[in-house]
Image (spheres, rainbow, N blue to C red):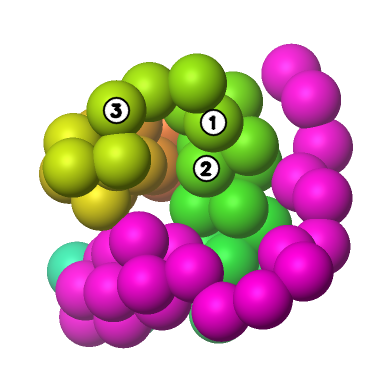
Amino acid sequence: MALAVLPTGPDLSVRSATTRLAEEFPELSAHSIVLVVRTCREELRGSPADALPELVERLARQRLRVSLD
């Protein structure tokens, strides 16, 4: 798995996913959630821009669920 690259500017797909996932997974640290979301965003960088927010959040949610198993 690739590690997250620091964004060069604000990325709404990362910010919105991070906010929602932090509420959904209160037992995980904010740092862990941000790292997973940014990594997912980087891995999905070739995806259509319109679909990116949903794809990032879905992939990050799945990875966070697996991390709790």
Which residue is tagged 3? 48
> Could you tell me residue 31's position as x and y percent?
67, 74
Give the vertical position of 24 relative to 53 (above or below): below
Could you tell me how many numbered marks the image carries?
3
Neighbour class for label 3 at 10 Å: few (<14), some, many (≥20)?
A: few
Residue 26 marker: none
As drawn, is 32 to the left or to the right of 19?
A: right
Numbered disc in front, either 1 or 2: 1
**Amino acid type indicated by mark 3:** Pro
Quarter-of-image position of residue 2: top right
Query: In what element is the residue under mark 2?
Result: helix
The Cα–Cα distance between marks 1 and 3, rounded to whole angstroms, is: 8 Å
Magenta region: 1-23
Which residue is tagged 1? 45
Q: Which residue is drawn at 52% across and 42% down?
A: 41
Neighbour class for label 2 at 10 Å: few (<14), some, many (≥20)?
A: many
Q: Which residue is drawn at 18% across and 42% down?
A: 50
The Cα–Cα distance between marks 1 and 2, rounded to whole angstroms, is: 6 Å
**Amino acid type indicated by mark 1:** Arg
Q: Is residue 40 or residue 10 the one in the foreground?
A: 10
Quarter-of-image position of residue 18: bottom left
> Could you tell me residue 27's position as x and y percent?
40, 73
Which residue is tagged 2? 41
Query: In what element is the residue under mark 1?
Result: loop
The Cα–Cα distance between marks 3 and 2, rounded to whole angstroms, is: 12 Å
Going from the N terminus, do you reach mark 3 or mark 2 first? Answer: 2
Query: In what element is the residue under mark 3?
Result: loop
Quadrant location, the N terminus: top right
The answer to whether the residue labelled 1 contacts the one labelled 2, judged by CB atoms less than 8 Å apart, is yes
**Amino acid type indicated by mark 2:** Arg
Residue 62 in view, yes or no: no
Numbered disc in front, either 3 or 2: 3
